[in-house]
Image (cartoon, rainbow, N blue to C red):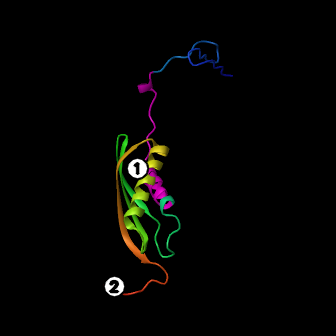
Amino acid sequence: MTRVSGRDGAVDERGGPLAVIAPGERGATRIADRVVAKIAAQAAREALGPLHPDAASPHATVVVHHDTVRVRVHLELDYPCDIGARCFQVRRQVVQRVRALVGMEVPEVAVQVERLHPAHGAAQGRTR
């Protein structure tokens, strides 16, 4: 049985003091790029709400460098809508969720709108 008392008074199972290991020597947790990309894509889905029935789910690509990640989100939107406002919501949600869940800074979120889906009842064809 291992006994542990307070932070400074930690003892091993024999009652002796535990060795103190410097933080830099304890190891590190590395989060895979694809995990960060999935978190960013899920955050984009959360920001958009319900999607058009024909729309593909948002997906993301990331470039991770140390504790910083740059994100590119690909998505499809309903039209007509305020495209700028929707993209802003996606950027804000991606930054917040990646910071909260992964602990990385997100200095850049590029949103690429791949396709616009006309709302039901909207005029089809060309508009001048």
- SS of the residue under disc 2: loop
The reply, left or right, for residue 51 in relation to residue 10 is left
Please report the bounds of the magenta region as a residue range.
22-45
* Residue 67 position in % (x across, y down): 37, 40
Residue 6 vertical placement versus 85 (above, below): above
Q: Residue at x 59, y 17 (%)?
A: 10
* Residue 69 position in % (x across, y down): 36, 47
Q: Which mark is residue 33?
A: 1
Q: Amino acid at mark 1?
A: Asp
Q: Nearer the viewer, residue 64 or 79?
A: 79
- SS of the residue under disc 1: helix
In the picture of the structure, the residue carrying the numbered disc 2 is: 127
Residue 57 vertical placement versus 61 (above, below): below
Residue contact at pointers 2 and 1, CB within 8 angstroms: no
Q: Residue at x 43, y 47 (%)?
A: 32
Q: Is residue 127 magenta?
A: no
Question: Could you classify mark 1 by the number of other residues whose Cα lies within 10 Å: few (under 14), some (14-19), or many (20 or more)?
Answer: some
Q: Earlier in the sequence, mark 2 or mark 1?
A: 1
